[in-house]
Image (cartoon, rainbow, N blue to C red):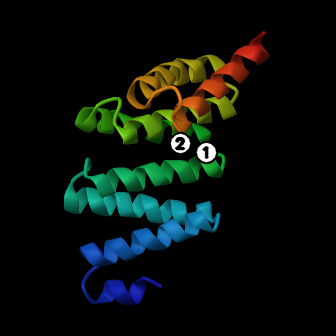
Amino acid sequence: MTSPAAAGPGAENPRVLWIRKRRAAVLIIGGDFRRALPEFDALAAAYARTAGSSSTDALECRRQAAYCRAEIGQSAAALKQFQAVLDQVRQADGDASPEALDLRRNIGMLLLAENRVPEALEVLQPLHEDLNLGYGPNHEETREIAEILARIRFAEG
């Protein structure tokens, strides 16, 4: 689908990269994580070459690749990639930026799904505190993390 477009202006032309990113996003929406993963990996590399490894597009593609890895059961690789992206986002925008908060949530939820409860708590408790400070106790995301923490505490007795 993107090959004819890439033949003209070049595979790393901004317009071609944009089309490829949209196509990969459609694959995710359709639940085809296995096909989306190599595309997001390739896009992340292309954006790193053309816009820099810490560019918004490169980080977003790496993040989407991590999401795909999590969905296909590559949890360890997904956690490592989410953490690497979070480290770069923290350096650029801080720990409480919307992107950092969402990445921290992804990491906490993946740890929880892996039944790594103590590690999940180490991520989710400070996340809840930051959400509470940034958005307030009645914000949807703050309440969601509060409910998850309450369920963990209830399960632990």
Left of 41 or right of it: where is 75? right
Q: Residue 112 got which mark?
A: none
Q: Which residue lies at the image location 50% right of the left edge and 48% below the top edge?
A: 66
x and y percent of residue 19 in the render? 38, 76
Residue assigned mark 1: 74
Outermost top residue:
157
x and y percent of residue 151 in the render? 72, 23
Residue assigned mark 2: 78
Outermost left residue:
51
Q: Which residue lies at the image location 21% right of the left edge and 59% below the top edge?
A: 51
State the residue in front, 126 or 52: 126
Element class at badge 1: loop
Identity of the amino acid at label 1? Gln
Quarter of the picture containing the C terminus is: top right
Q: Which residue lies at the image location 45% right of the left edge and 41% below the top edge?
A: 81
Element class at badge 2: helix
CA gap, disc 1 to disc 2? 6 Å
Identity of the amino acid at label 2? Ala
Outermost front residue:
138
Circles 1 and 2: CB atoms closer than 8 Å: yes
Q: Which residue lies at the image location 46% right of the left edge and 40% below the top edge?
A: 102
